[in-house]
Every structure is written in structure tokens, then in C-alpha cells.
Image: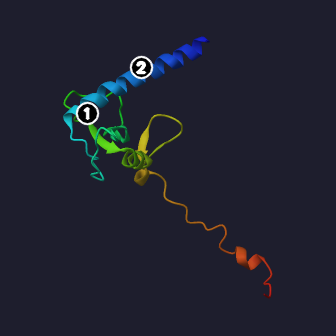
Amino acid sequence: MSANDKTVAEARRAVAAREQGYREQALKLYPWVCGRCTREFTRANLSQLTVHHRDHNHDNNPADGSNWELLCIYCHDHEHAKYVHQDGNATITSREEGPAPAKHKPFAALAGLFPKQDN
């Protein structure tokens, strides 16, 4: 195993340990209900309930849980889909603050470029 492989493996173990720590705390603090869709969870499907960091900083884990909310995997994905990474750095901005949507319609005149065929 190369030095890079060892570093990556150690980083993955550290992330898993950190996640397990705040996940267990959040599951003790909050009812097992998705904070968005209000779906209820039991031990049988608890793996589908995730911890979302409200400020998107996974290192901000106050013991009172004020930066966490429990979300089902679907609502969690939806929450993160609202944000985009720009220029490959860690700056997160909401899509509402991003560039305006494109208004150009490149295929608008496409039908006029082909001769009409009789059926």
C-alpha cells in the first residue's frame, strides 16, 4: 500500500468515526423523524435517516445539536442539490444567488430547417 493509499484510508476512517459520533448524538437528541417530509423511522429503517449540518460545515458539531437536523436520505439529497460548488473550491452559494438561467433556445428554429414531408 502506497503512502497516498494509507493517507486516504486514514482520512476515510477519521470521517467515518466523526460521522458516527455526531450521528449517534443526534439520534439521541432528536425524534427519529425527517425534519422535512416528517417520515417516521424505526430501528428497521434507521439507516435511511441522516444528519444534515445546517451550516454545511461537518466540523461544526456542537454538543447541543444546534447545527444538526435529521433528514431522510431523499430530503438530504434535495437539500444538498440546492447548493453548488463554484470553481472547484469549498465556497458554497445557493443557486438563487448564482447566474441567471439561460434564455437562449438553440433548437427553436430547428423544424424550419427540414423540408416538410407528406405522410
Instruction: Label 1, secondary structure: give it.
Output: helix
Q: Is residue 61 visible?
A: no
Residue at point 46%, 34% (across, down): 90
Count of numbered tags: 2
Residue that label 1 marks: 26
| Dot 1 amino acid type | Ala
Residue at point 69%, 75% (across, down): 109
Residue 25 is drawn in which quadrant?
A: top left
Q: Position of residue 4 (x, y in %)?
A: 58, 15
Nearest the viewer among 21 and 99 is 21
Number of residues whose C-alpha sits closer than 10 Å to that of mark 1, classed few (under 14), some (14–19) or many (20 or more) = many
Upstream in the sequence, badge 1 or badge 2? Answer: 2
As drawn, is 67 to the left or to the right of 115? left
Nearest the viewer among 6 and 81 is 6
Residue at point 46%, 51% (across, down): 98
Q: Position of residue 52 (x, y in %)?
A: 33, 39
Quadrant holding the C terminus: bottom right
Q: Position of residue 31 (x, y in %)?
A: 21, 41
Q: Is residue 62 visible?
A: yes
| Dot 2 amino acid type | Ala
On screen, residue 33 above or below 14: below
Q: CA distance from mark 1 to mark 2?
A: 18 Å
Residue that label 2 marks: 14
On screen, residue 71 above or below 25: below
Nearest the viewer among 12 and 82 is 12
On screen, residue 111 above or below 102: below
Residue closest to the far bottom? 118
Q: Position of residue 68 (x, y in %)?
A: 27, 37
Quadrant holding the N terminus: top right
Number of residues whose C-alpha sits closer than 10 Å to that of mark 2, classed few (under 14), some (14–19) or many (20 or more) = few
CB under 8 Å between discs 1 and 2: no
Residue at point 24%, 28% (across, down): 62
